[in-house]
Amino acid sequence: MATVFKQQKTKRDKAEGIVANDAEEKAIFKNKQRVLLLSSRGITFRHRHLLSDLGNLLPHTKKDAKLDSKSKLHIINELADLNNCNNCIFFEVRKRQDLYMWVSKTPNGPSMKFHIQNIHTMEELKMTGNCLKGSRHILSFDKNFESSPHWMLMKELFTQVFGIPKTSRRIKPFIDHVISFSIVDNRVWFRNYQITQKPVEHRSATDTTDLTLVEIGPRFVMNPIRTFDGSFGGQTAFENPEFVSPNVARAKVRNAKAGRYKDRMEALAKRDQKMKDAVLPDDPLSEKNVFA
């Protein structure tokens, strides 16, 4: 009914010669960011809890069912279009132990793939910090995000995906926590802190503010793998040369264990051969040979 009323009002204004000021209407910018949140099959309980924590932190997200296919990721663009979302966070699980996170701007890109490590969920950490569910947050980025183009692109992508629009329907009009992104060892460290007042007994005369930060959770580390110019595919814009696949790391550990086992077996074989060589020949004048 509202759309019909607006159309009829526009027709009436045109008939009466009333022209709306389009310049003022176009000058108003509305941040309409919506994020689709989903995962693949084979997700573990820890990964599922992390996905739930991100959904609680980002009230402008929409959850969808698990994706069956791991090779046809372009289907996610259609799912995002059906859910009226222009961003996507996709958890891809391999071998029920390796978690990869896709952050993408649907449907045209860019998109980034990360390997998630050191996962600690809210229930696991039991931190003392707390925040209102549905409240907005402040995004804090390390100064290293301005050091190279791919870090700058990552900062802009995180700003659009993790930033909560003030026009979102399910948000509370409060800002009571900070989400921090820091670059250490070419990895992005994710932390969530509550903004609270410092107790009076802990304040000093040199403090310029009475505010302090208390960690809430979750916390995890994102190791960037690749940046694509399209959504869930396309040409590679950046590739991390320092990334080592978890399969390769596990293979090195197995080979190291196999090498130690091989050395131990060779030492046992040498010992047996030495014991055989140390056996003395029979003495012809021994009692066994004389009185045989």
Image: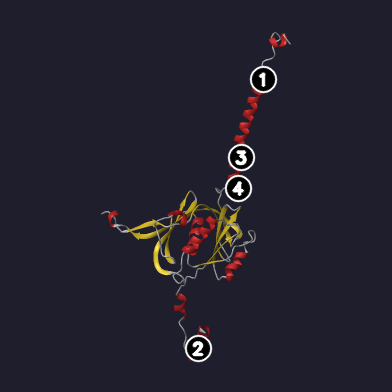
Alpha carbon distance from label 1 to label 3: 33 Å
Q: Amino acid at mark 1?
A: Asp
- Asked whether 71 or 41 is in front, the reply is 41
Label 4 packing within 10 angstroms: few (<14), some (14-19), many (20+): few
**In terms of sequence position, does the residue under pointer 2 or pointer 4 come before the other?**
2
Q: Marks 2 and 4: which is nearer the front? A: 4
The reply to whether residue 218 is visible in this rendering is: no
Depth check, mark 1 against mark 3: the one in front is: 1
Quadrant of the image occupied by residue 114: bottom right
Q: Are marks 2 and 4 in contact (CB under 8 Å)?
A: no
Q: Mark 2: which secondary structure?
A: helix
Rendering quarter of residue 272: top right
Mark 2: amino acid: Lys
Q: Is residue 141 above or below residue 31?
A: above
Q: Earlier in the sequence, mark 1 or mark 4?
A: 4
- Residue 103 in the image, given as x and y percentages of width and height: 54, 60
Amino acid under label 4?
A: Asn
Which numbered disc, 2 or 1, marks the residue closer to the eye?
Answer: 1
Sequence-wise first label, 1 or 3: 3
What amino acid type is highlighted by mark number 3? Asn
Q: Identify the residue at horizontal 64%, vertical 26% (top origin).
A: 270
Residue at the spot of label 2: 14
Q: Which mark identifies residue 144?
A: none
The residue sitting at 64% across, 30% down in the picture is: 266
Q: Earlier in the sequence, mark 2 or mark 3?
A: 2
Q: Secondary structure at mark 1?
A: helix
Pointer 3 residue:
255
